Image (cartoon, rainbow, N blue to C red):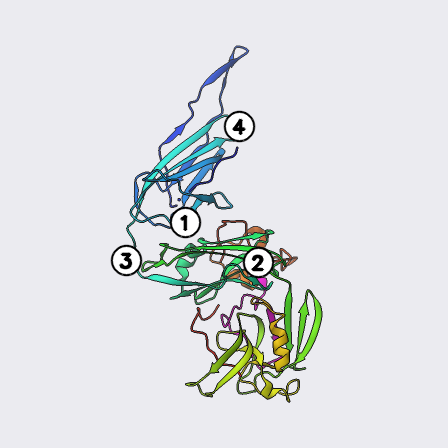
Amino acid sequence: MKFRRRMTLLAVTVAAVPVALGGCTIGGREEARPAPPELTVTPTDQTSDVPISAEVGTTVKGGTITAVRITDDTGAEVEGEPREDGSTWVPSAPLKPKRTYTAEVTATGDSGKTTTTRKTTFTTRPKSTKPAITSTLYFTGDRTYGTAMPVTVAFDPPIPEEARAAVQRRLFVRTNPSQPGVWSWVSDGSQVYYRAPDFWRPGTTISFRAGLEGLPIGEDYVGDADRRATSKIGRQVALEIDNDTKQMSVFQDGKLLRELPVSLGKPSTPTSSGKMVIMEKHQFTTFDTRGSADPYVVDVEDAQRLTWRGEFLHGAPWSEGVQGYRNVSHGCTNLAAAAADWLMGITEVGDLVTIKGTEVTLDEGNGWTAWNESWEEYVKGSALPVPAGLKPSPAAPNPGAVAGGSPAPVPSEGSGSPAPEPSVSGG
């Protein structure tokens, strides 16, 4: 049965209007009609002070939801769609403060012969006076990203552990083709990432919504905004940097394109080893570390950020004589000017960069570190149960084979400095 999707949230039951039960006579004996489905809708009727982030919850026994219609106090319909598990209907935009809404939900019995309809009316709370937690989306619309691009949201102040599940449930990802993934929190609550067991397929479209406006976050805060973005994944590019050989190998679609000599961080300012993701690209920028233990100001070209603390790939004509032989940088990966310029034309934000063999390892959250741990470790960061098909198993440590996303909207699953002011060091 086809019906239009409309929507709203919370919990309880309202007076039902089941189809009347009757009997019919067949061959002289009466046959009872199937019982109508049992249906519960939330918020309960006449509930007040409902958050504008509310969803309409539905629980059905002996049937399925076949119609949901939400209207405001002017009679206008509220657009929405169901979660993948059918537990709630999610409005496509936040509800309005101090407004009354009516939800009418119909369920059809398993036999197809009976229906139950419930209606509930509720009122949203006034505009919140609590401070909002600022959310920063590092996934913007109408872009092309690399295959390792995690959907990343940063929070200031960080989200307390007890509030992460509620926030995670309001983060929705849709991919085409469908590639299920999981949300995972940085331990301090400052960032949350979404990725799948493996990298995104080239050509995948990712649509993301952070429906956080008006969401109660703990006792003291609310969410700041409702944001959306849709972008595509480009061809697969990966960089591998080996401190032992002082070489960078550049791969596209699994094939080696070039090997480039590099100079990494000197012993006093070593480069981090780990799996990083290109975060920003700059044709020209200035590294200014005045105020640090090793202050300097230098203009650089073709700079690509890897960490919040200021590790970049960039052109460094001043170190070309030692590239491939000796480490002299302040933690960055130095390349010849021509090599850095060529590399800028190959990479995208979201491409994976793996560095190995240096004196220190990459810290959690120093950049988009979603790939710097195994899938088994990564999913432990989710504030919600991990879907059965994505749980790690000894026989299949990386289920899913190719990465990420979920049909939308879905309950969200869920390292670092939250969008701190990034440091512009390097050198």
Q: CA distance from mark 2 to mark 1?
A: 23 Å
Numbered disc 4: secondary structure: loop
SS at mark 1 in the image: loop
Amino acid type indicated by mark 2 = Lys
Residue bearing mark 2: 232
Magenta-drawn stretch, dominant element (helix, strand or loop): loop
Q: Which residue is mark 1?
A: 93
Q: Earlier in the sequence, mark 4 or mark 3?
A: 4
Q: Residues within 10 Å of mark 2 (few under 14, many from 20)?
A: many
Q: Position of residue 236 (x, y in %)?
A: 64, 64
Look at the image and say whether residue 358 sits in the magenta stretch. Answer: yes
Disc nearer the start of the sequence (1/3)? 1
The residue range painted magenta reads 352-375
Residue to which mark 4 is pinned: 111
The residue type indicated by label 3 comes to Thr
Question: Residue lying furthest top in this view?
Answer: 28
Pointer 1 local density, CA inside 10 Å: few below 14, some 14–19, many at least 20: some
- Which numbered dot is residue 304? none
